[in-house]
């Protein structure tokens, strides 16, 4: 991960028009090449924070810097050349008749000629594993495919930062896994900086490098999944739970005499520990 801070947030306060406090006291830095999950229960402020980062919300106290520049002083086009938000419901974002038309809308409005637009569309569809789908009718796509087209539309504009609101919402278990694998590939292979709002605690630690936990509009902790997903009581305080595998091993360690150690966060880690423990007992 590079040292350059793409986003630097020093948010003192944002309240809704009726005076309800939505976000407060948030200090967060996102480096180039980061893959960060904003983890929180419903109503914790995740979507609001994403909208604020994208410049859609502007009446707040504090600062959000994009590559060192205050986004409140940037023209929306300057923001959208670098960063874009993928809504939770793709039908709120897609409007063209075909996949290619929708993905081409951004780069065409940025002033690129037809040759460059076509190149960007093809490259973006390849990145989201939908090459050859440009001719397809948007309304004939699955929900997961629509989400991929939304991502492709931002990639075609050259965005180096993707903000995603609950990208696995509405997908079946296989679709959830494929979506997070796609995002991980964009991050690792193409250097895309990703900030993802989610409450999918079982899948997040398998793909994400860092977590930022939000509760009632406040940032309660930032760290690695291993650091933050280790205590069921702490997670319950922010209306979340441990990943199921971690919860199982927490109970085995604290109630059934399993040896102490870091909690496995996925099946592969859990399997390794169980096999090692079994072999150790066989040698006795």
Image: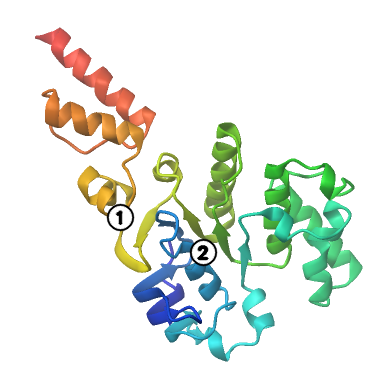
Is residue 186 depicted above or below 109 in this figure?
above
Can residue 192 be seen here? The reply is no
The residue at 40%/55% (across/down) is 40
Is residue 281 depicted above or below 224 in this figure?
above
Indicate which disc residue 68 carries. Answer: none
Q: Residues within 10 Å of mark 2 (few under 14, many from 20)?
A: many
**Where residue 265 sits: x, y (%)?**
33, 37
Q: Mark 2 points at which residue?
A: 47
The residue at 43%/80% (across/down) is 14
Q: Which of 177 and 247 is in front in this view?
A: 247
**Where residue 133 sits: x, y (%)?**
83, 44
Indicate which disc, 1 or 2, sits on the residue closer to the N terminus. Answer: 2
Quadrant placement of the C terminus: top left
**Where residue 187 sits: x, y (%)?**
53, 54
Q: Which of 237 and 167 is in front in this view?
A: 237
The residue at 33%/51% (across/down) is 239
Please tell me in which quadrant of the rendered image residue 10 appears.
bottom left
279 left or right of 195 in image = left
Q: Name the residue under label 1.
A: 238
Distance between mark 1 and mark 2 Cα atoms: 17 Å
Q: Nearer the viewer, residue 11 or 162?
A: 11
71 left or right of 224 in image = right
163 left or right of 147 in image = left
Please tell me in which quadrant of the rendered image residue 19 appears.
bottom left
Circle 2: element type: helix
Q: Nearer the viewer, residue 85 or 90?
A: 90
Is residue 124 depicted above or below 56 in this figure?
above
Can residue 116 be seen here? The reply is yes
Q: Residues within 10 Å of mark 1 (few under 14, many from 20)?
A: some
Quadrant placement of the N terminus: bottom left
The residue at 59%/35% (across/down) is 172
């Amino acid at each position: 991960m590079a040292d350059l801070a793409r986003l630097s947030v020093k948010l003192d306060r944002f309240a809704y028009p009726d005076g309800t406090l939505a976000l407060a006291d948030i200090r967060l830095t996102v480096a180039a090449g980061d893959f960060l999950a904003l983890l929180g229960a419903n109503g914790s402020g995740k979507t609001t924070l994403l909208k604020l980062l994208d410049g859609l919300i502007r009446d707040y106290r504090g600062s959000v810097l994009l590559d060192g520049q205050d986004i409140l002083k940037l023209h929306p086009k300057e923001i959208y050349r670098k960063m874009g938000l993928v809504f939770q419901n793709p039908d709120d974002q897609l409007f063209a008749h075909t996949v290619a038309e929708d993905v081409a809308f951004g780069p065409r409005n940025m002033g690129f000629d037809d040759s460059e637009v076509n190149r960007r569309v093809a490259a973006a569809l390849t990145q989201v594993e939908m090459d050859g789908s440009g001719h397809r009718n948007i309304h004939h796509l699955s929900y997961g495919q629509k989400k991929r087209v939304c991502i492709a539309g931002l990639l075609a504009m050259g965005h180096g930062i993707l903000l995603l609101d609950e990208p696995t919402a509405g997908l079946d278990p296989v679709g959830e896994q494929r979506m997070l694998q796609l995002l991980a590939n964009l991050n690792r292979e193409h250097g895309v900086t990703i900030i993802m709002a989610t409450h999918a605690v079982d899948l997040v630690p398998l793909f994400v490098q860092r977590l930022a936990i939000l509760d009632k509009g406040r940032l309660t902790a930032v760290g690695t999944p291993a650091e933050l997903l280790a205590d069921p009581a702490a997670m319950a305080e922010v209306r979340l739970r441990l990943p199921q595998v971690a919860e199982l091993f927490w109970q085995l360690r604290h109630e059934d005499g399993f040896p102490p150690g870091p909690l496995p966060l996925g099946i592969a880690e859990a399997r390794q520990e169980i096999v090692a423990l079994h072999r150790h007992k066989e040698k006795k």
